[in-house]
């Protein structure tokens, strides 16, 4: 039987925070299966966001799943969660097993092409508490992920997030760092990103 959850791990020890990267959290066969189902069966939506007084459509599609109907708000958007389904529960339990941490909510982001992106931000909304842990699963097309420290210009990182990989952003990551998935200069196929978080 193929090992779906290899223990290969890279620890990225940066000033004020630690990040853990599992490049083969799901093997290619399982990652392909998860990607196909999520792409076809997720109730994707595209919200409007207001930046510097201008309103425009968010440059990606999203969906929220979570416990007990707790809403999640960011960038003046309030999302109400769908109920966990069996597939997302399966993924959540595997992520929790690896992180040794319990999550209540997952935000799914669908990047349809190289034009879709997510600008510099931290997942530091008040409902996540003062020092949240975020686990980010990538499926589909590889994209570049950037990290930068809020005050230390030398503390930064660019990482290619592989199909089936898991990035765990531990304590300090959302307090001292911002991250982004920028637009790409070359054509990109679709990518789905699942960010697990705990709403207090």
Image: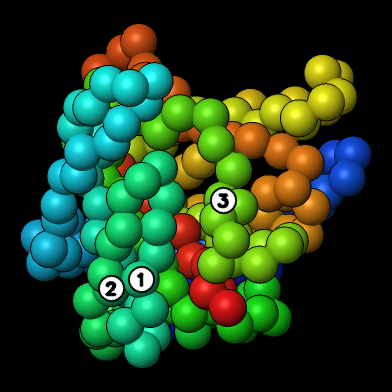
Please name which of the two marks, 3 or 1, marks the residue nearer to the observer.
Answer: 1
First in sequence: mark 2 vs mark 3: 2
Report, in whole angstroms, how far the alpha carbon at label 2 lies from the one at label 3: 17 Å
Q: Are marks 2 and 1 in contact (CB under 8 Å)?
A: yes
Q: Secondary structure at mark 1?
A: loop
Q: Are marks 3 and 1 in contact (CB under 8 Å)?
A: no
Residue at 55% across, 67% down: 127
- Return the x and y of residue 110 as percentages of the image width and height: 26, 46
The 10 Å Cα crowd at callout 3, few under 14, some 14 to 19, many 20 or more, is some
- From the image, tell me which residue sits under label 2: 81
Q: Secondary structure at mark 2?
A: loop
- From the image, tell me which residue sits under label 3: 123
The quarter of the rendered structure image containing the N terminus is bottom left
Between residue 127 and residue 20, name the one nearer to us.
127
First in sequence: mark 2 vs mark 1: 1
Left or right, 146 with reference to 186: right
Give the colour scheme of this rendering. rainbow
The quarter of the rendered structure image containing the C terminus is bottom right
Residue at 55% across, 36% down: 121
Residue at 31% across, 13% down: 186
The 10 Å Cα crowd at callout 1, few under 14, some 14 to 19, many 20 or more, is some
Q: Secondary structure at mark 3?
A: loop
Between residue 55 and residue 134, name the one nearer to us.
55
- From the image, tell me which residue sits under label 1: 71
Left or right, 184 with reference to 37: right
- Extreme residue in the right direction: 15
Tally of numbered discs? 3
Report, in whole angstroms, how far the alpha carbon at label 3 lies from the one at label 1: 15 Å
Report, in whole angstroms, how far the alpha carbon at label 2 lies from the one at label 1: 6 Å
| Vertical relation: 16 (above or below) 80 | above
């Amino acid at each position: 039987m193929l090992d779906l959850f290899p223990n290969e791990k890279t620890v990225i020890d940066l000033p004020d925070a630690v990040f853990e990267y599992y490049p083969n959290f799901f093997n290619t066969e399982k990652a392909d299966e998860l990607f196909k189902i999520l792409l076809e069966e997720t109730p994707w939506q595209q919200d409007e966001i207001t930046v510097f007084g201008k309103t425009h459509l968010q440059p990606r599609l999203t969906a929220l799943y979570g416990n007990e109907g707790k809403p999640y708000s960011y960038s003046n958007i309030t999302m109400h969660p769908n109920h966990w389904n069996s597939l997302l529960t399966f993924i959540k339990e595997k992520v929790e097993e690896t992180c040794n941490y319990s999550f209540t909510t997952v935000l799914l982001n669908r990047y349809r092409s190289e034009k879709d992106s997510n600008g510099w931000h931290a997942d530091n909304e008040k409902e996540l508490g003062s020092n949240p842990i975020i686990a980010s699963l990538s499926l589909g097309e590889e994209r570049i992920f950037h990290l930068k420290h809020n005050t230390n210009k030398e503390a930064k990182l660019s990482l290619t997030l592989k199909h089936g990989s898991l990035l765990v952003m531990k304590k300090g990551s959302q307090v001292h760092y911002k991250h982004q998935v920028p637009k790409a200069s070359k054509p990109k196929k679709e990518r789905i990103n699942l960010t697990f978080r705990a709403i207090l």
